[in-house]
Amino acid sequence: MAVPSVAIQQRPSMLSRLAESRNTLGLGFMLPAAALLLVFLTYPLGLGIWLGFTDTRIGRPGIFIGIENYQYLWSDGVFWLSVFNTLLYTISASILKFVLGLWLALILNEKLPFKSFFRAIVLLPWVVPTVLSAIAFWWIYDSQFSILSWALQQMGLIDHRINFLGDPTNARASVIAANVWRGIPFVAITLLAGLQTIPQSLYEAATLDGASRWQLFRHVTLPLLTPIIAITMTFSVLFTFTDFQLIYVLTRGGPVNATHLMATLSFQRGISGGQLGEGAAIAVAMIPFLLAAILFSYFGLQRRRWQQGGGD
Amino acid sequence: MAAIKEVERMDTDEGGMGYLQSLPRRVVTVYLPLLVFMIVLLFPFYWMTITAVKPNVEMTDYVNYNPFWVVHPTLEHIRYLLLETSYPGWLLNTVIISTAATFLSLAAAVLAAYAIERLRFSGARQVGLGIFLAYLVPPSILFIPLSVMVFNLGLYDTPFALILTYPTFLIPFCTWLLMGYFRSIPFELEECALIDGATRWQILTKIVLPLSVPGLISAGIFAFTLSWNEFIYALTFIQSSEKKTVPVGVLTELVRSDVYEWGALMAGALIGSLPVVVLYSFFVEHYVSSMTGAVKE
């Protein structure tokens, strides 16, 4: 671009002014990202909603059938079971992740030898591909050679092997445990970052005023940590709600659909079963829940701004 | 005891209040829970490793062999995995796809983040918010329409199906992360360059990018890890055995009917995890700070 000449000229030509204008440049710079996102994210999102109103199958374009898919799902017991499972899975896993993650964050916030080493170790479950760690859990939960069953038997706590993935209740508990194992690091490390921003002087002041350790936590740590808790947990809830990999590896939705989540049901009906329209409808049914979570996050952010004294 | 307390007090000189706690109390409230957490978090990796080198005899015989240990370690499972399955091919596919998707996303994200953060074109804030919302759209609700698109575009069962769809979650993430980095670069530097007659493109390549190398590294590692770990798109868009990625290949090809090759499966999981773990261990500080940074934004 002929910028030096622009500096000399009294009035830059229309073209060079256009080329230097923020909006044209901004548009040009945004182009690659916007094109990729519009084509492969926004358009499929709309296409998914459209597919939910059609009877498309694999290899056959569908026609518009209105809300027939949704009517069918409304009377489908398996779909409602998957909604229930998804909510149970999301709520119990998120609560456990929050409590254990916060606890771990509080421990790591103490003065410890090898602190950065521990912090590095803690993140490992989160870094390793979910499918691959889920395969390890699959072997840990094996009906015959489960190491957990063996260890508990050796300790004399149980007298026969636990059927981890074959029994509905056990299977639900097992997948939740595996999900919590993978989710703790994310919660712990982000909350730890939040904890480190709390000034020590507040604790010292409260201690001088005679606050107990519980009061320190309840009235100093928790209020100051609330904004980051809100954001972290929104992400955590979002990822747990849309989880697919763990269930697909461990149970494929079984036994008797007891661990089917909406995402796995959508895959089973849409891709394995070939009913793309119905699968898309199940996926679309997840959107209201996700929107609720995002709104929650939005208000979490709002509160943070307000605490920092307004503005953005 | 008094000596220990004295040492502890000196240790906590930098502002902590740990000295208010006695050592036994610290053992119960800090060290013991930490030990339990570490054991639980690391056990699956230990179990993966030990199974990968265990001969089949020991693996299924809990009476004569303690399952927590291995008496005659073997490399048989790893040899089988590397020489008799398509595993090396899957590794190569995953490396190629992850690298391509990472570079594509990074290039797009750098431009987008710079435009939103520094060009401040009209509507930049709304676009920034849109990028954030795009990050919240999960692959689980996109894979069905995307599979239709991928099929219609003739990309089905090609690496391009993944290279072009991974940026949908990589670009929002990288853009968000890089926006934070660009924000920390002083405006004055750019203003000086503008006065000296630099174009925006020159400012980006000669001033902003060299200053944000740490940010680029974090974003790159994140993007690479996310693509390496991706599963649902790879499962849906790739059919041929030799074109699969590691997570999909291990799960769908190594598990045959009722015969579970546990040793090979664990070896596959272990070797498939190694690249991201190694990458992560080199850049752990970047990783932690940018992860918390990205959430804090």
Image: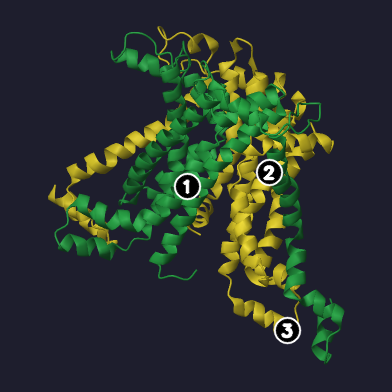
Chain colours: A green, B yellow
Residue at x 38%, y 32% (from the top left corner): B39
Task: List the residue tagged with mark 2.
Answer: A45
As helix, strand or loop, the secondary structure at mark 2 comes to helix
Residue B212 visible: no
Q: Chain of mark 2?
A: A
Q: Amino acid at mark 2?
A: Leu
Q: Residue furthest bottom?
A: A10
Residue at x 81%, y 76% (from the top left corner): A18
B206 lies above or below B139: below
Q: Is residue A81 left or right of residue A66?
A: left
Q: Chain of mark 1?
A: A
Sequence-first disc among 1 and 2 = 2
Q: Are marks 3 and 2 in contact (CB under 8 Å)?
A: no
Task: List the residue tagged with mark 3.
Answer: B196
* Label 1 vs label 2, nearer the camera: 2
Q: Amino acid at mark 1?
A: Thr
Residue at x 38%, y 38% (from the top left corner): A95
Q: CA distance from mark 1 to mark 2?
A: 21 Å
Are marks 3 and 2 in one subunit? no
A8 lies above or below B191: below
B228 lies above or below A249: below
As helix, strand or loop, the secondary structure at mark 1 comes to helix
